[in-house]
Amino acid sequence: MKVAAETASGGKKCSVSIVEAFRDDADGPQPKDLDDVLRLEYRSKLLNPKWADAMLAQGSGGAYEVSTRFTAMVGWGAVNGVDDFVWDGASEKYALDDAVSEQLRRSNPEAYRNVLARLLEAAGRGMWDADEDVLRRLREKYADADDSVEGVA
């Protein structure tokens, strides 16, 4: 809907509000700015150390949940944009932290490979202005993860 509204307005950026139907107060459901909702989602889940630890403790299912957040983030990045601090923090936590990335890889190799692929996709599509050294490290980790999943080496 956001892309359609921007296209209809000649490419002008549009502010989008959403209503969370499951939340209600005395005045009824209140619209919230999409950017604010996404920032809260990323801070309370993906970038929250307690949430990350809980997901890692769940093994394969937790790794899958982390992976789906990265896939969704690419989708939101294409439609609405995602702040670089979110991409930076997520890459540092789940891909560049060797202990965490190894735990993800052991728990669910496909999910781990997806995390890396989505980070590289975001940078490649211009959604994330990543540091070249970070991209180099992500590419190396992706190549290793891909080899592992494919049974090479």
Image: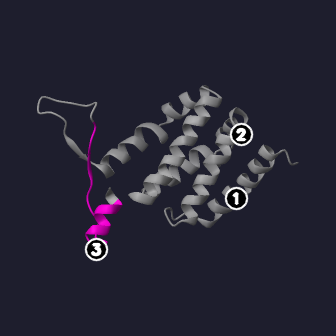
Q: Return the disc, 3 or 1, that comes first in the chain's sequence.
A: 3
Q: Which residue is the extreme one toward the left?
A: 27
Q: Which quadrant is the N terminus positioned in? A: bottom left
Numbered tag placed on residue 10 in the rendering: 3
- For mark 1, does the 10 Å Cα neighbourhood hold few (<14), some (14 to 19), or many (20 or more) residues? some
| Residues shaded magenta | 3-20
Relative height, residue 126 to residue 100 (above, below): below
Between the residue at mark 3 and the residue at mark 1, the CA separation in whole angstroms equals 37 Å
- For mark 3, does the 10 Å Cα neighbourhood hold few (<14), some (14 to 19), or many (20 or more) residues? few
Q: Residue at x 30, y 66 (%)?
A: 6
Relative height, residue 105 to residue 116 (above, below): above
Instruction: Give the amino acid type for the residue marked by disc 1 in the picture.
Output: Arg
Among the 4 quarters of the image, the one containing residue 41: top left
Q: Is residue 100 left or right of residue 130?
A: right
Q: Is residue 9 left or right of residue 153?
A: left
- The colour mode here is one colour
Q: Which residue is the extreme one toward the bottom?
A: 10
